[in-house]
Amino acid sequence: MSSPSARPVALVTGASAGIGAEIARLLAVDHDLVLTARRSEQLQALADELKQKHGATCHVFPADLVEPDAPRKLFDTISAAGIAIDVLVNNAGFGDLGKFAQSDLGKALQMLQVNVVALTELTGLFLPAFVARDSGRVLNVGSIAGFQAGPYMAVYYATKAYVNSFSEALHTELRRTGVTVTVLCPGPVATEFAAVSGMQTTRAFSAGQAMGARPVAAAGLRALKAGRRMVVPGWRNKLMLFAERFFPRSAVLSAVKWMMSRRI
């Protein structure tokens, strides 16, 4: 188990690439890590890198959160190893571009499992111990997509609305305790997520629109350490959310549809 003199331990899901990998790199300066994702080779390479650069102890526990029993198995594996988690980073997630009526329904249901169900279950499994010891931090990766509906990515936008709402509610419930929940709400980020989801061909990923994964991760961790409820990195994203307040809902939906359309 962790001792008072030991480095705190952070669990990062979806740690093999993108925002998750950058969060792990930044945390490794003063945390030990539990890294999980589907791809064990990438996780092990990251673990070796972080041990060499920062002396971080990194436990690699591959898991596919699409599987309904994966969150519980991961929790049980960590518990059996005697590892006490101090920071939970729910980063794993994926999206899919296209009209819902023409989409792969199975993939949409898997998206719900990873983006919503697994995130909720992992939070529910680890949070009671945080509350019992009056210490712990949770960082959930939401999105600015969660602030409006998303034509052509209806399920993904809906999952991020859940993450944003769920995180804000927990943050409020936990006020005046030593436990905080923060939601990181980035806009487009230059990671493999765009290629996997098909979003790299959309107007949302036009030149200059996507932020790098490192500054997004850094913004999230600054907010986490400060115990903030929410952080929206990037002035363009902040401006867009502010401007939405002054337009009819129908106009916002039309704008999102245009942004999610493919570039010619």
Image: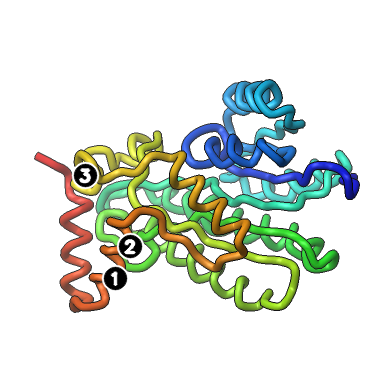
Q: Are marks 3 and 2 in contact (CB under 8 Å)?
A: no
* Quarter of the figure that contains the N terminus: top right
Residue found at x 24% / y 48%? 204
Residue found at x 54% / y 71%? 168
Q: Secondary structure at mark 2?
A: helix
Disc 1 marks a residue whose amino acid type is Phe
18 versus 180 height, above or below: above
Percent position (x, y) of residue 159?
45, 60
The residue where tag 3 is placed is 202
The residue where tag 2 is placed is 238
Residue at the extreme left? 264
The residue where tag 1 is placed is 242
Q: Are marks 2 and 1 in contact (CB under 8 Å)?
A: yes
Percent position (x, y) of residue 199?
29, 42
3 vs 2, front mark:
2
Disc 3 marks a residue whose amino acid type is Thr
Q: Secondary structure at mark 1?
A: helix
Residue found at x 39% / y 51%? 105
In the image, 136 versus 165, the foreground residue is 136
Q: Secondary structure at mark 3?
A: loop
3 vs 1, front mark:
1
Percent position (x, y) of residue 101?
28, 56
- Mark 1, Cα crowd under 10 Å, few <14 / some 14-19 / many 20+, is few
